Image (tube, grey):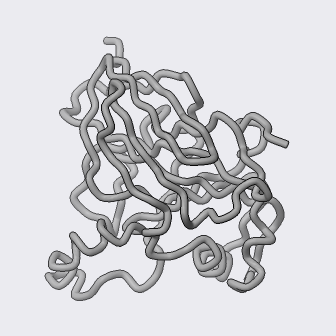
Amino acid sequence: MRRPASEVATGSLFGIALNYKGLLESRLAEFDQPPYQKPPVKPVLFIKTSNTRNGHDRPVVFPQGVERLQPGPALGVVIGKEASRVSEDEAMAYVAGYVIVNEFSLPEDSYYRPAVKAKCRDGFCPFGPDLVPASEIADPHALPLKLFVNGELRQENTTANLVRDIPRLIAEISEFMTLHSGDVLITGTPEGRVDVHPGDEVVVEIEGLGRLHNTIVAEEA
């Protein structure tokens, strides 16, 4: 049974950077340069802190003093039970369901160290509207994902293009830390992020999960 996402996805919000093939491939030349020397060999994790939590049909604030704000459409995986040192073969048994996430951020210079100041502004992680149980999604690795701004399609991809699939993410993350019921893994945002501005209507659509709607508003003085 579907439930409001805010009632179920109550834990920590973990993001994974560079988890779409097109995005990773676009940065490969950069990773050959110092200080990196090679592409990342483990998931590049970041945390969306509790102040970033936001919901469906809620405003997202365009902060004062910044020039650009970018939405990030993503599939969220909600953990259903405590997961520690879980194998890839067992991993999907720990998934309660899925939720649409819009992982807002200010543009970043480094994917190896995603900046807290860019990622963790108030309200920068809307998710919802509902938690879709895992049993309702036949294949979470074949879901079309779209971003609309003011009704115009601005970004389109599919979860078939994830670098690391959901079982691998759960296995690699639970290898060194315990995941708890209600935690959310934000599986990544695709290449081609766009800028939005105060007054824009932003919608993320994922097949089978519905549509997540937010309005961009200017921060008050």
Q: Nearer the viewer, residue 205 or 31?
A: 205
Q: Quadrant of residue 21?
A: bottom left
Residue located 36% across and 81% down the image: 40
Q: Nearer the viewer, residue 187 or 114?
A: 187
Q: Position of residue 127 (x, y in %)?
A: 58, 39
Compared across the picture, whether 47 is left or right of 67 comes to right
Compared across the picture, whether 165 is left or right of 221 comes to right
* Quarter of the image where the C terminus is located: top left
Q: Position of residue 93 (x, y in %)?
A: 80, 71
Q: Quadrant of residue 184?
A: bottom right
Q: Residue placed farthest to the top in the image?
A: 221
Q: Quadrant of residue 135?
A: bottom right
Residue located 68% across and 84% down the image: 88
Q: Up-down: is 40 above or below 126? A: below
Compared across the picture, whether 113 is left or right of 180 comes to left
Q: Position of residue 116 (x, y in %)?
A: 40, 51
